[in-house]
Amino acid sequence: MIKFCNKTIFCAFLFSLLFFLNSCKTDNRYLDSLNDKALFNEAMQVLTDVVVYDIFSPPVASRVYVYPTIAAYSIIQKKYPNKYMSLQGQLTDFIDVSDYTDSSIIPNLAALHAFLVVGKELIFSENKIDTYRENLYKDLRSQGLSRRELNKSIEYGEIVANEILRWADKDLYKQTRTYSKYTILQDDKYWKPTPPDYMEGIEPHWNKIRPMIITSLEIFDPPPPLKIDMTKGSRFYDELIEVYRLGEQVTEDNNDSEEAKIAAFWDCNPYVSYHKGHAMFAIKKITPGGHWIGITKIATELANDSFDEAINSYLQVSIALFDGFISCWDTKWNTLVVRPETLINKYLDEEWLPKLQTPPFPEYTSGHSVISKASAVVLTKIYGDNFRFDDTTEVKYGLPIRSFNSFMEAADEAAISRLYGGIHYRMAIDHGIDQGEKIGKYISANLNSLISNQEVVQN
């Protein structure tokens, strides 16, 4: 009888011990979630979805990406001061954020919160960020996150977010909202709004926005565009004819040719309108910058990055996008080069339409060429030259997967897609590639976020 009781008590003890150990394991699940790059990738995708929903222009979208990412990175840098460098002295007018001292703060959670708070301030559909954030914190609480850890992490994230927002508030974005619009000039050589919507020129004063890394826009200036010369045999006329004939071929091939597929894959026009009679509807798409943010996500997954390493990659790319658009838009609105569609309709074929809808801003240089090459350069520095990946970014927008052997290969395809799409001359593409490469290399040389192993030893 006594032996039976002892055996029963011992079994009960083992059961209780196993239950306790299992409970402890369950209560710490939130730490695994918060250490997984998938969580930050998910938050970035939510921001991209809002950018698409709110129809931000490509330059403005780059601003929506960069400030939240800097907020997240700044907190991660505080967590790993021997791995990552402060951005003070590197980004224009940037002052390092406050450090954290409370041991209850979980830096990864604070970084996520700061990312979402800053992102929410830069978009319109705030409820989408709120909904995601509420569900995220509810889920983490169910995984064992204590209320104190949550509150303290949120509190610190709020502090950093507000510091980043005060800095962002001085980049002249708000002031440029009140600047004068572009006045249409009648000469053939100047850009004019194009069909079907004849939209006003987007962001003619974007070159006034404060850059992150680049200190002078002039050093990235491409060669002057070709003189607009409609004389048969002139260099410009030959480039115009190339757009016209290739555009006709791609249109005739419908969606079956490789050129048509490439053009569609890299369209990245945030707002494409369709008109039939008096009816009109529009399709929202990802921006060019959003596409490269998506490629960054793919890279972090293939490389099996940690949570902090993923944020560092997004930092490099978002800054390349931001400064790349400032440089490109400076070129666009200083050269005011007319789009191919305008001249083709006037002088060659009034019924001709490009495969892609012509974006509402000047032609030279090609924005996609610039920011794609700049992004590819910084990603190549992080992940190497021969980084093969399947680009699934456009799947959710109804386009198939395309595969690339390197970031540079993807960037070159993105650039030539503008010729296949009928919206750029070859000069804008070639010089845009060179412009983007210079920007990418400059940022790679002057943005030092990761401390080398040698520097860590010396410290």
Image (cartoon, rainbow, N blue to C red):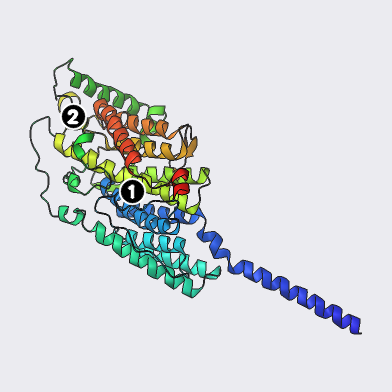
Residue 334 at what x, y percent from top left?
A: 14, 37
Direction front: furthest residue: 458
Tag nearer the camera, 1 or 2: 1
Quadrant hosting residue 102: bottom left
Residue for badge 2: 345
Q: Residue 284: which numbered mark, if any?
A: 1
Direction top: furthest residue: 233
Number of dots carrying numbers: 2
Circle 1: is it few (<14), some (14-19), or many (20+) Cα within 10 Å?
A: some
At label 2, the amino acid type is Asn
At label 1, the amino acid type is Lys
Considering only order in the chain, which callout, 2 or 1, is on the residue closer to the N terminus?
Answer: 1
Residue 160 at what x, y percent from top left?
A: 34, 63
Q: Give the side of residue 91 with respect to residue 315, left or right.
A: left
For label 1, the SS is strand
Quadrant hosting residue 214: top left
Which quadrant of the figure contains the N terminus? bottom right
Q: Give the side of residue 379 with respect to residue 61, left or right.
A: right
For label 2, the SS is helix
Q: Determine the residue positioned at 27% across, 43% down.
A: 323
- Up-down: is 233 above or below 287? above
